[in-house]
Image (cartoon, rainbow, N blue to C red):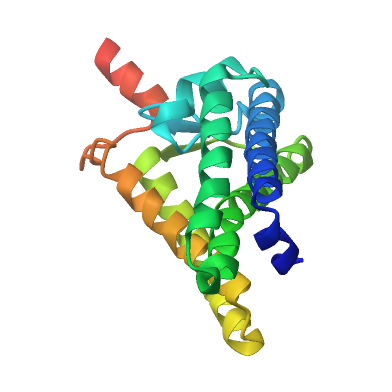
Amino acid sequence: MIEWLISNPFIFGLTTFILMCIDWALTILQETERKEHYFKHYQSYPINTIEGSPSFQSGVAKRRFINPKHFIASVIIGTAVSFALMLIPRGFSALFIGYVWGLFIIVCTQHLNNLFGYIASRKGLHGKLCLHQRTAYLIQSGRYFSIAILLLTLSILSGSETIFGVTIAGFTSALRQIIWLKKVPVIEKSDLPPDLELSKNEN
């Protein structure tokens, strides 16, 4: 399979584009489920969003399956990885394929995990979680790091360059959360949930 993809780089690029579209669709499904059923149980702040990437937070809030900004980015990335696969030394091709697809497959599995959790929580869940975005990024980074450790073990045991590429993608995803975290205001010692903060300001 990997050798076939190396020989057909545009199929690799097209599949990458499709993975990005699936990632977006799962994000919108997750946001829709949250807005319609889960909103009373979960809120992030300072910005109330489930989307990690600051570039697409406003687009996710609109809940449109076709987002021009994301679509254009998907086309560009799909095309770029096709040409990159042709240009890099063949010895790194399997690693590259694993890395690129790992970036999107890992995040898609997280979307599925959250989506199933939201659906299951329609019943039997009480109370509300107010989560600061910095805390949310740290939690998500820990999840990606844990997945990467599992993948690292599998890559060592199997000797698979492709799985090692996915492993690097896992560590990259964990690091990306930390980078995004730096853009969020720090948590003050007097930090309060949004509802209590609003009441405090009104008084």
Q: Could you tell me residue 189's position as x and y percent?
A: 20, 43
**Number of numbered discs:** 0
Which quadrant of the view contains residue 97? bottom right
Residue 58 screen position, x and y as percent: 47, 20
Q: Position of residue 113 (x, y in %)?
A: 69, 50
Q: Is residue 17 above or below residue 164?
A: above
> Which residue is at the front of the view, 141 or 20?
20
Q: Residue at x 47, y 26 (%)?
A: 57
- Please tell me which residue lies in front, 59 or 3: 3
Rendered position, 30 above or below 153: above
Residue 144 in the figure: left or right of residue 155: left
Q: Nearer the viewer, residue 185 or 26?
A: 26
- Residue 171: image quadrant is bottom left
Viewer can see residue 66: yes
The answer to whether 119 is drawn above or below residue 103 in the figure is above
The quadrant of the image that shows the N terminus is bottom right
Q: Residue at x 31, y 48 (%)?
A: 179
Q: Is residue 203 visible?
A: no
The outermost residue toward the top is 202
- What residue is rendered at 67% in x and 52% in y? 109
Residue 130 x %, y %: 46, 36
Query: 33 and 82: which one is in front?
Result: 82
Residue at (37, 57) in percent of width and height: 175
User: Up-down: is 177 above or below 147?
Assistant: above
Q: What is the quadrant of the C terminus in the image? A: top left
